[in-house]
Amino acid sequence: MDSPTTPLISRRDALIVGAATAAAVSASSATPASAQTSSASAPTAASAGSASAAGGFRMKLSLSVNGTARALDVDTRTTLLDALRENLQLTGTKKGCDHGQCGACTVIVDGRRINSCLTLAVMHEGAQVTTIEGLGTPQNMHPMQAAFVKHDGYQCGYCTPGQICSAVAVIDEVKRGVPSHVSADLTARPILSAEELRERMSGNICRCGAYSNIVEAITEVAGSKA
């Protein structure tokens, strides 16, 4: 039985008192030294003038995009994909998975194809970037673009810019003698077979399933028979 002289307190009241006590202790634990450090660092950040509103930092960046010099001022966290689409309005390069798994964002940087969603724009100072817009226009198509149209190498078309950029780079890789995972002899010049093409293009996903037509298009441009 409860003692008549012992006051009762509910669990709810105990939690409220505990939380209030903890908050009071936390507030009183701030020292003048920490406050001084905080106030001293504020002018430094302000004088730098590079912090963005979202908490990141900005950098100036120079690129050659499709043969044209472009100067950008971007958040250091901006991917090359977002810089192309949002800053330069080159929306031909598509954002698919944003994890480097689908290849829709493929562009050619300094002669090599990359997934632009996986690399930061500031990592490519002075680089030569080619997007689908730089390969050709509807009035003057690149041979690979024309071959994709001829062989129906697309359906919805969302992955097509990445497919075409990747295909152009694949032919260049073969010409340079770069082997793939299915190359039987790493020292011999690669043969542009259907197996080689499928392996080299395996990083570009076509959810519509136009793979056989894509192989035919690349084969025609490469001037070989797969």
Image (spheres, grey):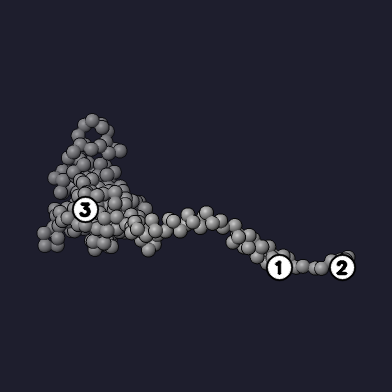
Is 33 on the left or on the right of 56, as rendered?
right
Tell me which residue sits at (15%, 49%) in the image.
221
Residue lying at the far left in this picture: please name it: 140
Classify mark 2: helix, strand or loop.
loop
Local crowd size for mark 2, using a 10 Å CA cut-off: few (<14), some (14–19), many (≥20): few
Which kind of residue does numbered mark 2 sit on?
Thr
Q: Position of residue 161 (x, y in %)?
A: 24, 57
Residue 194 vs residue 183, the one in the foreground: 183
Position of the C terminus, as image quadrant, is top left
Tell me which residue sits at (23%, 45%) in the image.
112
**Residue 29 higher or lower than 187, as above or below:** below
Is 174 on the left or on the right of 56, as rendered?
left
Residue 33 vs residue 178, the one in the foreground: 33
Classify mark 3: helix, strand or loop.
strand
Camera sees residue 159: no
Residue 117 vs residue 18, the one in the foreground: 18
Q: Position of residue 52 (x, y in %)?
A: 36, 61
Is 28 on the left or on the right of 109, as rendered?
right
To which quarter of the image does residue 194 belong?
top left
Q: Nearer the viewer, mark 3 or mark 2?
A: 2
Spatial separation of the CA atoms under disc 2 and disc 1: 21 Å
Numbered circle sitting on residue 63: 3
Q: Position of residue 115 (x, y in %)?
A: 30, 51
